[in-house]
Structure formats: C-alpha cells, structure tokens
Amino acid sequence: MVQLSASPPQTPPPADTTALKHWLDTLSQRIIKGDRLKKTEALTLTQIDGQDNILLLCEAADRIRQACCGNVVDLCSIINVKSGNCSENCQFCSQSVHHQGENSPIYGLKSSEEILAQAKAAEAAGAKRFCLVSQGRGPKYNSPQSGEFEKILETVRQITTETNIKPCCALGEVTLEQAEELKKAGVTRYNHNLEASENYYQSIVSTHSWGDRVETVKNLKKAGIQACTGGIMGMGETWEDRVDLAISLRELEVDSVPINLLNPREGTPLGHLPKLDVFEALKAIAIFRFLLPEQILRYAGGREAVMGELQSLGLKSGINAMLIGHYLTTLGQPPENDHAMLESLGLQGGEAPIPGEYQTQTQKKAH
C-alpha cells in the first residue's frame, strides 16, 4: 500500500453557483468516461459548503452512480452470531471487553438452526445477501480446539443448500487458507472494514493495526472472495482522512464499500461525540462516489439514526446498496419501509453489479 502524502496545495471550487454546477458536470463526465480523481481534486470537493452547493455535489454524484452502476440497489441483512467480550479496543464499538457499552448483548456462538431461521427471514424480507458477523480479532487467532470456524463453515453450507440467499461473513482476520475454506463453503463476499484512514487508525484502535486489516482484504481477494470493505464517518477524523480512506479502498480494488455513520454508543470512548450533520454525511457519500465510481456504496450502520427523515437523499447522492433489518447492537427500520422508499425514488431492490459488471452488461445490450 502506498503511503499517502500530506495534504497537497488545493485550489478552491468555483464560488458562483452556475460555475460550480458546470465544474461538477465536467468533473463527473470525466469520471464516467473512465478518468479517476487525484487526491488534490477530491480535497477540492471537500471545500464545497452550504446546503445548496452540497446538493449540487450530490446530484453530480448521482449521475455517476446511474452511469456506472445503474438503478439496482443492493439489499443485504446481517446477524450478530456472537456478541460481546471482544478482545479488541475499537473506540466506537460497544462490544469491546475494554469498554462494554450499555445494553450491549453478550452471548456465545448462535446455533446453526437459529442462524438459518434468520437467513430465511432475511430472504423473505427481500435481502439478497445475509452476513454472519462475529466479534473478536478473527479465526486467524482462534484456538483450533474451539471449533467455531468449522461450525460457521457448516452453517454457511446449510444456508446455501436451504435458501437462495447468498451467505457472506464478517469474522475478523483470516489467513489465505481460511479464506479459501470460506470460498469452498459458499462465501462469495466478506466484510472486513478498514474503518478509518491509515493515518487516523491508531487513534481509534491500538490492539491491532491498519496493516493487519489490509492483509486480510488481500487474502480474501487472492481466494476469489469479493471484499466488502469500508469505514465509519464521524469519529473525529478530518476530511483528508476520509479522502485517504476512499483512495486506499480504490487502490485495494474492493467491490463493496459500507459507509457507516457513527451512532455514538454510551459507555464507549466515542460515546460523547455528536452525530454527524446530515449534509456533512451527504457530502461524504458524494465524495466517496466521485472517488469510487464503480464500487457498490452501501448505507450501513447509523443510517436511520443520523439521516432520519432525509435518508432517501443518500440514495440520490451516490449510494446504491443498503442494509435492511436490524444492525449488530441497534435496531433498524422495518424492511417494508425501505422497499417503499426505493419505489418512491424509482429504484429497484436486488443485487447491484460489482465494479466493471454494469458497463459490460450495457455494452452487450448495445450490440
């Protein structure tokens, strides 16, 4: 991974609304035609302020989404298969043994029967993918005697046999051999977030490194598993940190990018932080779309809590995927509300194309 440099000199975006709109149109068309933003250009986008101007940025990001990804919104659901007493000290997480958040559940690995029942419920609710999420640093460090990794592999095989939903996993760090076992069991996508930029990561976690996260992403890709890798906005990071994170994800060539909006949890070191302003969140989403034009950008944790009644705006600012149902330690809104929101926006729930796939499909139709 190339070490990102300090902030280079920037020119401000056009101050006049008409000029700004023209500039954004030109920039978005460049991206649609295959060009990719430099860090300096992305940092210029971060200087766009004021609700009206941010909405112009969002409109341009939405055009990139339509041209590079189409109108299908990727729908997935998650289950917390093992919760609490996590060895890691991620400052945002209420499952850490270092700072167990209030009302955070603690339980061991759920049974295959319970996980399978939830997979079937997620499928009935319209999800196309179902992710098994576990606390802890990962199978790479688990005792072989625990047998938990083998139990999860068996559960994945059951899901592939008894449902049409695609199983995903988010179990923490894995070796290349473990990634290959997951692939054989039926896992085609694995969530492993970088959470923050390399520069800011040490302010958020000290029990493992940013490089450890990157190594697992590379192992997944080598095994032929799609990387679902993103981060969290609103942890005290700078705009440059957000840009650096997006550029790192682009360099890693990840397929899906969850954009979590911090919903501060009482009892955690970040519990005192205010929630992101809605327009700051929209601006971040739009800039991620400018930097990651073909990736699946996923509304993840904090969507309802931060965006509230304006969450539909994210789907017109570059987002083309979302979690439906509940999250790891907080509740989501009913799936039927999400389906109604998509329909009102002229979008279709389903399985969004991975990078390069939509253009290939479009070219085939043209011929």
Image (cartoon, rainbow, N blue to C red):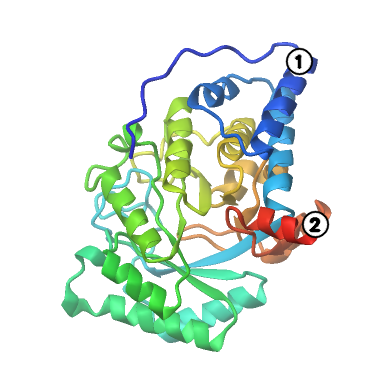
State the image coordinates of residue 92 (x, y, percent, origin top left).
38, 45
Residue placed at 52% from the left, 50% from the top?
257
Going by the picture, which residue comes out furthest to the front?
367
- Badge 1 marks a residue whose secondary structure is helix
The mark lying in front, picked from 2 and 1, is 2
Residue under numbered circle 1: 19
Quadrant housing the C terminus: bottom right
In the image, residue 59 lies at what x, y percent? 74, 34
Image quarter of residue 11: top right
User: In the figure, residue 309 lies in which quadrant?
Assistant: top right
What amino acid is labelled 2 in the image?
A: Ala
Q: Can residue 17 be seen from the camera position used here?
A: yes
Secondary structure of the residue carrying tag 2 is helix
Q: Position of residue 161 (x, y in %)?
A: 51, 88
Disc number at residue 366?
Answer: 2
Quadrant location, the N terminus = top left
Mark 2 crowd level (few <14, some 14–19, many ≥20, 10 Å Cα): few
Q: For mark 1, does the 10 Å Cα neighbourhood hold few (<14), some (14 to 19), or many (20 or more) residues?
A: few
130 lies above or below 99: below
Q: CA distance from mark 2 to mark 1?
A: 34 Å
Please say if 315 is above or below 53. below
Q: Is residue 301 visible?
A: no
Q: Amino acid at mark 1?
A: Ala
Residue 366: x and y, percent?
80, 57
| Residue that appears at 68% across and 13% down | 14
Q: Residue at x 74, y 54 (%)?
A: 71
Tell me which numbered mark, 2 or 1, is placed earlier along the sequence.
1
Query: How many labels, in total?
Result: 2
Q: Is residue 143 above or below residue 242?
A: below
In front of the other: 237 or 20: 20
